[in-house]
Amino acid sequence: MIKKAEPSTTPSMQELVSLCKRRGFIFQSSEIYGGLGSCWDYGPLGVELKLNIKRLWWEEMTSHPNIVGIDASILMHHTVWEASGHVEGFNDLLVDCKACKQRFRPDDLTAQICPSCGGELTSARKFNLMFKTFMGPVEDEANIVYLRPETAQGIYVNFHNVVESARLKVPCGLAQIGKAFRNEITPGNFIFRTREFEQMEMQYFVRPGDDEKVFEEWLQSRFDWYARLGIDSHRIRLHEHMKDELAHYAKKAMDIQFEFPFGWQEIEGIHNRTDFDLARHQQYSRRNLEYFDVETNAHYIPYVIETSAGCDRALLATLLDAYSEEEVRGEKRVYLKFPKAVAPVEIAFFPLLKKDPLIEAADKLFHDFRRRYRSMYDDAGSIGRRYRRQDEVGTPFCVTVDFQSLEDQKVTVRDRDTMEQDRVAMDRLAEYFEDKFAHHE
Ligand code: ATP
């Protein structure tokens, strides 16, 4: 278990959005043109944070002896989406306001009139959430392709290629990280619900009959994984889909939910998809997608246990949970308590003052360390302000070179959480950090 120092505070979404913009985590897409609704761009720190989350997920999956990765293309044959049931069934209900033309999901409405202007609403109709485009220069029905609404189908259609080429035996899993697109009717809550997002999905193929046991194992393992992002286990919980909530393909489905400022909401789904997907692809492609089990001497279509996590939602939960506020000498200190493996910057290097010999020494350390650790150099503003900036982006350590350093060859290392300072000999700094980062927690 990862221990975190108290205190932790939940910021308002507004506070978090503003910190993300100010410090270069996340910006509104196309902001200079007034922004594009529900699309967000990751800035220098956001992209590092996201990469770290993806790396931790990827390592977790591919360190498993029977799991390999793939990277399928976003555009796929249109029949894939007929086989998967998305063309027919990936719909949300939608109502329009006849007066102001805004659109709503009926389940978001509490009254029969438009919540925005009080106008009359149309009756509900189905709206397919897949983005459509055309392949090639001719814009006709035959050339329709969809932007994938989930990464899972890329795994199912490659199942046989991968199992044969990688010589895998069931039970085995395929892991994939990639973009997915859904034309959500009511996106919102910052990066929580967007129309373009990233998924981290692993589909685990098992013998029919083993599915229920394996489902429980993956459920536990996925729940536990969030501790690696520093997320407090009290702020996540499981929610089981009741019969009427279950997707057409699912025998059992559990959500891992996080306590967002706007309520408990899903960050990952674990589903028992049975043999639905492979059986449907077998039917639509007319290819034999059965697996021959040499141990049991039987042909069957494997069952699939799916773990489907949203990268952006995991990142939002990580930011919210890491956010901490405390009072230090009458002033508010905001810091992000990221685990070291998650922090976008691991070590920041400062000269105490903007003086040549100090700059030179700090810059040298920065160059020595930046290949080994995600590092940053900063000499702008007072040292207090620089510490505050690094606290706000969650940098675990700051190293300061002062005039004394030029005499005794020692630097000050400040710890983000305790604000304690160690005086460390420069020639022992590598060893010092090796020890500090050893367990990468
Ligand atoms: P919701 O009920 O919130 O729409 P869902 O049940 O449709 O989610 P899944 O189809 O199970 O979601 O997708 C798996 C994961 O992908 C979700 O747990 C979530 O983390 C992520 N995800 C799905 N839709 C979005 C979206 N519009 N924006 C960001 N992440 C998303």
Image (cartoon, helix red, strand yellow):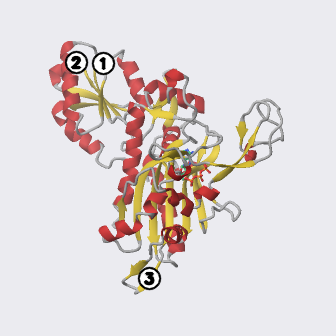
The amino acid on which the numbered mark 3 sits, given as a three-letter code, is: His
Q: Which of marks 1 and 2 precedes in the sequence?
A: 2
- Relative to the observer, which residue lies in front, 92 or 187? 92
In the rendered image, the quadrant that contains the N terminus is bottom left
Q: Secondary structure at mark 3?
A: strand
Q: In 3D space, how far apart are the residues under numbered discs 1 and 3 (Cα atoms)? A: 66 Å
Question: Does the closest atom of ligand 1 sit within 8 Å of the Cβ of label 3?
Answer: no
CB of mark 2 near ligand 1 (< 8 Å): no
Q: Nearer the viewer, residue 211 or 420?
A: 211
Residues at marks 2 and 1, CA–CA distance in whole angstroms: 8 Å
Numbered circle sitting on residue 359: 2
N-term mark: 2 or 3: 3
Residue matched to label 1: 379
| Local crowd size for mark 2, using a 10 Å CA cut-off: few (<14), some (14–19), many (≥20) | many
The structure residue drawn at horizontal position 33% and vertical position 60%, both measured from the top left corner, is 63
Q: Position of residue 412 (x, y in %)?
A: 27, 27
Q: Secondary structure at mark 2?
A: helix
Three-letter amino acid code at the position of disc 2: Ile
Give the image quarter of residue 295: bottom left
Q: Name the residue carrying label 3.
A: 299
- Compared across the picture, whether 430 is left or right of 212 comes to left
Q: Are marks 2 and 1 in contact (CB under 8 Å)?
A: yes
